[in-house]
Image (cartoon, rainbow, N blue to C red):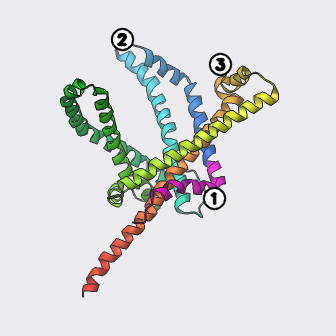
Amino acid sequence: MSFSPVQASFEGFRFIRDRPKSVTLWMSALLALNLAATAFGLSPWAMRLQQLKVSTEFDWSWETVQVFAFHLLPAAFLALVLMLAGLCVVAPSILRVMLHPGAAPRFRLGPDEGRMLWLYLAMVLIVFVAAIPSGIVLGYSLSLARPVADAIGSGWLLVLLGQFASLLMMLFIVIRLSLAAPIAVDQGRLDLMEAWRMTRGVFWRLLGGALLGMLLVLAVSAIALVGFYLASIMIVFVLGISPDSFSAFLWPQDEGVLNHFGIGPLLRAVFESALLAVLFCVLCGEVVYAYRELSAVQASQDSEDGEAPSAVG
């Protein structure tokens, strides 16, 4: 099989090298979403949500339900829109350009974005449904093994293994369905079964590519952070300002708008959005590479199956 986890992990970085203007546009979109989420955090709805979160006593009545509906429903809707905007608007734009290199990056609310929304909701539902029986089996298994584990002082290891099993189950479902995203954009249809069939037998390769890609993103983030702090030290040294003053510039301690929208916080937001754009491109690059390679393998197998009868005859 020609599919290579190493090649998949580097596909997104190659795209960043070849299409820096497109990546800058997606970074700008992610920055706008970041700032919108920050503005939402300062809204009365978000503040009311925080008050409700820390409250422990409620006088349940029809009036209380009305208050909850008035404050929670709009806030929950806006929070959901901001959360899904990156996945359902920015990600399809990246996939369209990666699948069709001649295309220009565009943001829109069209069929691709609708299919991406339904794909996200379907994956959340599948993970939730799968977690119920697996959680019951895992819970009983842990409860039966706990006395033995506690007797030998390995109770912590049992808990760790349980968490690892739950994580592996979620990763298995997400990775097996990951090719549904490029299928939705390239073929214009939402087909979970096709994605599941295409990834049969290559789960560990896909997982290896995803883990390697994440390690590379972490390495890039670490290098960028080191460069950011070195540049900060040089600025402090050249300008002759105190480290405390520069720290207050980047992380204002006041409770006003400057704490979120000052020059320092905006620079941090740009930096975070750039790293997030790299992460989006790496993940999308991996699934597009896997989709192309596995589609070619599947087409070859289908061609051989179709030619087999004529060869016999």
Gap between marks 3 and 2 measured at Cα: 36 Å
Q: Is 9 colored magenta in this rendering?
A: yes
Secondary structure at badge 3 equals loop
Quadrant position of residue 270 = top right
Q: Label 2: how many residues lie within 10 Å, few (<14), some (14-19) or many (20+)?
A: few
Secondary structure at badge 2 equals loop
Name the mark nearer the viewer: 2 or 1.
Answer: 1
Name the residue tied to disc 3.
Answer: 253
Looking at the rendered structure, the kind of residue marked 3 is: Gln
Q: Earlier in the sequence, mark 3 or mark 2?
A: 2
Residue at 71% over, 30% down: 263
Name the residue tied to disc 1.
Answer: 18
Q: What is the x, y in percent for residue 5?
A: 45, 56
In this rendering, is residue 93 above or below 225? Answer: below
Looking at the rendered structure, the kind of residue marked 2 is: Asp
Gap between marks 1 and 3 measured at Cα: 40 Å
Q: Looking at this rendering, what residue extends furthest in the bottom direction?
A: 313
64 or 116: nearer the eye?
116
Quadrant position of residue 138 = top left
Q: Which residues are magenta?
A: 1-25
Gap between marks 2 and 1 measured at Cα: 59 Å
43 or 273: nearer the eye?
273
Q: Earlier in the sequence, mark 2 or mark 1?
A: 1
